[in-house]
Image: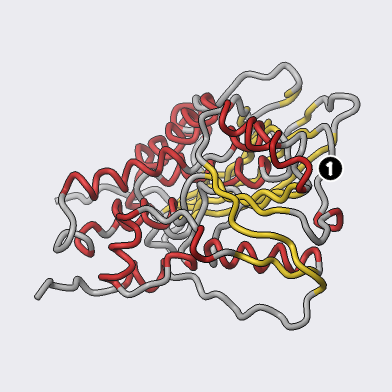
Amino acid sequence: MNEEKLPEGKLSPLSLKKNILTYTGALKPELLVGPAVGEDAAVIKWPEGKYLVFSSDPIVGASIGAGKLLVRINSNDIASKGADPEYLVVTLILPPSMGEEGAAQIMREIHNECLLQNIAIAGGHTEFNSEYDRPVISAAMIGTADRVLRASDIQTGDLVIITKHIAIEGMSIIATDRPDLLSSFMSEEEIEKMRSWSDEISVLNESKAVRKVAKFMHDPTEGGFMGGVKEISLLCGLEVLIDQNSLPIDPLTRRASEKLKFNPLNLIASGSLIVVVAKKDLPEAQKSLRDSGIEFTVVGTIGEKIKSEMPEFEEELWRLLKMEKIDEQ
């Protein structure tokens, strides 16, 4: 019996054209040289009067829907700087067991999300490597902005807004990859609702709504909401005073945190955007968010200079994904 030979190394030119280069995201005339067999780099004609915004992020915690998530987390970093995501470069290092169709599936997810956000795939690298038993996917993204948001512009008395609710990404990953952790105290409908939160992970719309008045914006990822708050505090050198009673935590997230004994404020929180605005600009920010149909909460203020550093906030997701199922007594 002959075993099928698994792929190893870079894809052949034919396979690359069929499974990877078919998926190029949005078409942009400014992309003068894009992805093609034999091309080493992209060439982009840059618009005058725009700032270049650059970011890079991998996907390490999710498996199902990882391609879509890859685009959204990189887009969120760009959006948090008040910019529009424009170009994406993708690196896929895949276990040979995934095969060419597995590579094509990830690229289809990336392509479809890029179409939704008007992002062009400018290039990348794809290979099969037997050193890995799970896909390793990473991307770099370029965006364009009309102004620069700097943490150094934050001042005492500014206000802190959080959009949507806390721990959107973390709870959607748990509901998708470890529903067994939830099944003893949640219905299938409730678990499915949390899975659907993956559709809320993009913060591009809220960025567009408030970018004209925002002093600073931040996408809270690993370390959760409180990790994001600490990062802002360290950047601006000022205390960030949070009203714990005002924080928007969905009842499903709260129930899961009580049953599984984790802190939702330390669970990876992409999908929410932390926005700092001057007090005088709060009404305009609120109106813009309401007009865009985006839920938001004013959760704190910027205080005086840091007197003592905030504690470290350890990400909860990795422990939860490795947790054994808890049977309800």
Q: As rendered, which of 244 and 119 lies closer to the eye? A: 244
- Relative to 79, say whether 167 is above or below: below
The residue that appears at 84% across and 42% down in the rendered structure is 148
295 vs 283, left or right, is left
- List x then y, in percent, for residue 52: 81, 38
**Which residue, as the protein is rendered here, is positioned at the far top?**
29
45 vs 42, left or right, is right
Q: As rendered, which of 250 and 283 lies closer to the eye? A: 283
- List x then y, in percent, for residue 114: 54, 30
- Relative to 215, say whether 243 is above or below: below
- Relative to 114, say whether 175 is above or below: below
Q: In which quadrant of the rendered view does residue 306 lie?
A: bottom right
279 vs 80, left or right, is right
- List x then y, in percent, for residue 49: 90, 27
**Which residue, as the protein is rendered here, is positioned at the far left?**
329
Q: In which quadrant of the rendered view does residue 259 lie?
A: bottom left
The amino acid pointed to by label 1 is Val
27 vs 19, left or right, is right
Q: Can you identify the residue that label 1 sits on?
A: 148
Res. 24 in view: no
- Relative to 264, say whether 123 is above or below: above
Q: Dot 1 surroundings within 10 Å: few (below 14), some, or many (20 or more)?
A: some
The residue that appears at 60% across and 51% down in the rendered structure is 298
Disc 1 element: loop
Number of numbered labels in the structure image: 1
**Which residue, as the protein is rendered here, is positioned at the far right?**
49
Res. 103 in view: yes
Q: As rendered, which of 114 and 97 lies closer to the eye? A: 114
Task: Indicate how the structure is coloured in the image.
Answer: secondary structure
**Which residue, as the protein is rendered here, is positioned at the far bottom?**
308
- List x then y, in percent, for residue 272: 53, 48
